[in-house]
Amino acid sequence: MSELQEKESRSGEPGLIQAIHVGEILCVGTELLLGQIINTNAAWLARQLTLLGISSYYQTVVGDNPDRVRLAMETAASRSDLIVVTGGLGPTADDLTMAIAAQVAGQPLVEHRESRAAIADYFHRLGRLAITENNWKQALLPQNAQVMPNHNGTAPGAILEFTYQGKPKVMILLPGPPSEMNLMFQESAAPYLEMRTATRFRHHFVRLIGIGESAAETLFLDLIDGQNNPTLAPYASEGEVMFRVTQLIHDESEPDNTAGLLAEIQKRAGDYIYEIGPRNMPALVKDLLLEQNKTISFAESCTAGLVAATFGEISGVSAVFKGSIVAYANEVKVNQLQVPADLLAEFGAVSEETAVAMAKGCRDVMKTDLAVSITGIAGPDGGTADKPVGLVYLAVASERGVEVRRMQIPGNRARIRKVSTLNAFDLARRELLR
């Protein structure tokens, strides 16, 4: 039993607030405002709150300024039941989040013995016997806080229940590093919140490829306009479209009423749908390869390793992924992928013929069941009237032969490479489903 659960068990009550309906996310750190670090915490937390049935209407990023942090906390407390704060719990002088939160909650800071002991143990395991006062500062927590241990770092988190403008509020304080924040939320914050939410959201994700956002939305416009419960909401990312079907429930035992809506979506979208579920395209390809006991490799030119890097992010992918050859230069295509030099001279590096030869050569060299090749002009330079920027050829080689896809992808260099990567996986998926 966690310290948080023990405290509630002893008190016999869940605390000031009985039900949380609306939450918001506050991320502290000047580095976020300057764009030096991408704010992945907000996106991750937003998903977790949604899964817990908590609606969030605001997300705020504020720099390491005490007055502005306090104003952001007070503003959030004035309009939401729950404020989830990340960042500013470290040992440096500008890490003031815990102290400011204590002020907003009207609680003094006191030393938490268990946290001090955990900090000492952490540094002793690292071989550091001299611990500075800055590090001990992390053990100073609001007097009535429910403390959340940090199993990936030194800064503990805290759950504060307090009254603001006559209404009960909860503030959850989490460290900024994602590896610390994610684990602490899952271990301590999520169980706390589950006991204080009266509703849940039942989600189904419908993922489509080969159709644009506006065209996809047109297919389902009457369903979107006439929605109640469940609801239908579109999301677009580069190269694909996703629709979220959501049912508001009060108990997991309630029947799933999304089946009719999902059936109508399938009827209208047809082959554009590649998944109804949580898996994205690379994860789906990995699972298909595992199911069929097959392996894959990639030959990349314009994507320059992006396909391999994307696939490598998936846990367990080593069971199906043998490797990738980044063949930017023609001599690498010739020497490593066995692309005939005369073929390159006749058709050029960006051509159907070269894509086919790259896929075949990759499959032979890597000795995989499938090999996917990508060659194109990502820009912004290098385009011609015959071969403009955004022209991409993809090919997949298997025991059945070779399939080719020609694409003209609009957008900048980053978008062209990303959409090419997504379509490389889609080509592999379609081959595996043949």
Image (cartoon, helix red, strand yellow):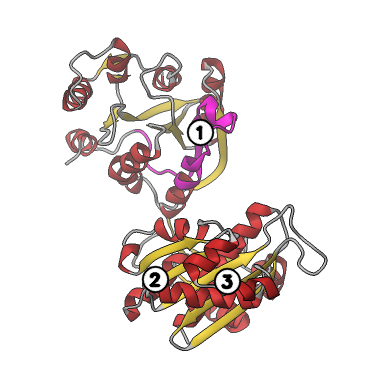
| Sequence-wise first label, 1 or 3 | 1
Q: Label 1: which residue?
A: 26
Q: In this view, does 180 lie to the left or right of 361?
A: left
* Front-most of residues 349 and 199: 349
Residue furthest to the right: 385
> Residue 113 lies in magenta, yes or no?
no
Percent x, y of residue 46: 49, 47
**Kind of residue indicated by mark 2:** Met
**Kind of residue indicated by mark 3:** Leu
Q: Are marks 1 and 3 in contact (CB under 8 Å)?
A: no
Q: Label 2: which residue?
A: 366
Percent x, y of residue 15: 31, 34
Using the image, determine if residue 124 lies above or below residue 245: above
Q: Quadrant of the N terminus?
A: top left
Write down the region rendered in magenta: 16-44
* Residue drawn 51% across the image and 37% down it: 80
**Kind of residue indicated by mark 1:** Leu
> Residue 27 lies in magenta, yes or no?
yes
Where disc 1 sits, the SS reads strand
Crowdedness near tag 3: few (<14), some (14–19) or many (≥20) residues, C-alpha within 10 Å: many
* Front-most of residues 36 and 279: 36
Crowdedness near tag 1: few (<14), some (14–19) or many (≥20) residues, C-alpha within 10 Å: many
Q: Which mark is residue 208?
A: 3
